[in-house]
Image: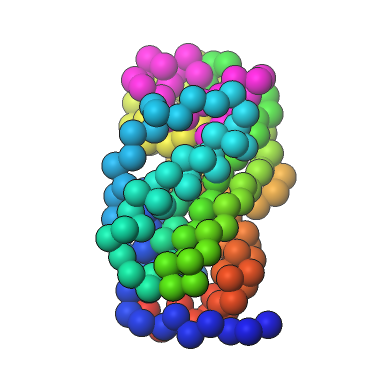
Amino acid sequence: MVISSLLTPGAFVLASASPARRKLLQTVGIDPIVRHSQFDESQIQCEDPIELVQTLAHCKAKTVAPYFQDCLIFGGDSLLVVGGEIYGKPGSPEEAIARWQKMRGHQGTLYTGHTIIDQKQQKTLIRCGITQVYFANLDNATIEAYVNSGEPLNCAGCFALEGKGALFIEKIEGCHSNVIGLSLPLLRQMLEELGYRVTQFWLHK
């Protein structure tokens, strides 16, 4: 494999305002430039969850890309499907409570779209990570207490695996970091496909 030499400071750009995605990247040694795309997600209407998250991830990265040269631009987007219904971030505490009352005791599928735009090589990769999530059968008082903590209101799927929400997930099947915001193994594979070693980005701290 030919190893590309994209090693300039600030070579990795995160086109997302998600603190969870940034923290995941920092945990594995990648300290990205953060540029919120501010892309209007309501523009995209699609009933297929894979196509939807991939399109949204691509649009976020594409919106940010013109502002950076010789960089890798990463865009991500997540959603949860339970019982055939697509869920993003809840719009209110009342919606979050109602959603948890539907999800409890059931299985959901978490989809995360991943896009990398390589400005230097003029290449774009688009992928989707898929993880199965099994929810605990919570009582109403626990659901209300969790929603009142504020955590579910900021999360696709109405829970944060890296926070209090971990108490209420019985098990997952697949990549756990995919549930948090991006699949680290999938990210590594995409970087390798573009000709990079993920260890190259450990220099940017």
Res 167 quadrant in image: top right
Res 105 quadrant in image: top right
Q: Going 39% across and 70% down the picture, which residue do you hit?
A: 71
* Residue 204 showing in the rendered view: yes
Identify the image quadrant of the C terminus.
bottom left
Against 35, is 121 above or below? below
Q: Going 59% across and 24% down the picture, which residue do you hit?
A: 47
The segment highlighted magenta reads 79-99
Q: Position of residue 191 (x, y in %)?
A: 57, 69
* Residue 26 showing in the rendered view: no
Against 22, is 85 above or below? above
Front one among 162 and 44:
44
Q: Going 36% across and 82% down the picture, which residue do you hit?
A: 8
User: Is residue 1 inside the magenta stretch?
Assistant: no
Front one among 140 and 102:
102
Q: Position of residue 161 (x, y in %)?
A: 52, 44
Against 110, is 13 above or below? below
Q: Residue furthest right?
A: 173
Rendering colour mode: rainbow
Q: Residue furthest front?
A: 122
User: Is residue 87 inside the magenta stretch?
Assistant: yes
Identify the image quadrant of the N terminus.
bottom right
| Numbered circles on residues, count | 0
Horizontal side, residue 29 vs residue 128: left or right: left
Q: Position of residue 202 (x, y in %)?
A: 45, 80
Front one among 135 and 65:
65
Q: Going 52% across and 21% down the picture, which residue do you hit?
A: 100
